[in-house]
Image: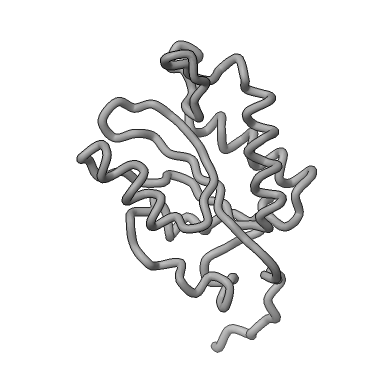
Amino acid sequence: MQKKQTKSEIKIQGTYGWFYIIQLAHNGKWGFGITMNPDSRLRKGYCNPSAEKQVFSHLYYGKYSQIRALERHLKNQWSDKMLVLFDDKLEWIDPKHKVTGKDIVKFVDARCKAVYPEIYKVKKEHLPFSPSKVFKNVKDSPDVFLENIS
């Protein structure tokens, strides 16, 4: 029995970017951020400087204005949980707060569902994300890679 083809529910138009959640392989700290290119960000921002393979445990793709707003909201709401190093507040969660990746995902999913209709989750079969060009066709085939946040 052939599966009936359905029209894509996900429409990708305009400038889109990525929101990621990461747990560092070498020290277990949880963090987050935004990027226009997850492959390059992961390689140059995390793997190479740490000399360790790193992965994005969760990825979200969406309209860039909403991605930026999501990051700002998380930073504002969790300001007291952010790690401070050399007087700089970082995009890392201070381990003393015992925040897990599940906590971050729950917060992000709830915010996206309530406020950001043009942010989508990367499907579980594409996670964790290691440096690769797997998402090069995300705009052409969003249903292959993305799902609505439920």
Foreground of the two, 149 or 19? 19
Q: Residue at x 44, y 55 (%)?
A: 38
Q: Residue at x 79, y 45 (%)?
A: 115
Q: In this rendering, would 44 be left or right of 103?
A: left
Q: Position of residue 16 (x, y in %)?
A: 62, 61
**Residue 98 seen in the figure:** no
Quarter in which the N terminus is drawn: bottom right
In the figure, residue 106 lies in which quadrant?
Answer: top right
On screen, residue 16 above or below 110: below
Q: Residue at x 47, y 58 (%)?
A: 37
Foreground of the two, 68 or 29? 68
Residue projecting furthest to the front: 87
Q: In this figure, which colouring scheme has been used for the structure? A: one colour
Q: In this rendering, would 2 be left or right of 63?
A: left
Residue projecting furthest to the right: 115
On screen, residue 14 above or below 37: below
**Residue 105 seen in the figure:** yes
On screen, residue 75 above or below 128: above
Q: Position of residue 112 (x, y in %)?
A: 71, 45
Q: Residue at x 65, y 64 (%)?
A: 15
Q: Position of residue 71 (x, y in %)?
A: 63, 38
Foreground of the two, 59 or 125? 59
Residue projecting furthest to the top: 96
Q: In this rendering, would 105 be left or right of 10?
A: left
Number of marks present in the image shown? 0
Residue projecting furthest to the left: 51
Q: Position of residue 130 (x, y in %)?
A: 33, 54
In the figure, residue 75 lies in which quadrant?
Answer: top right
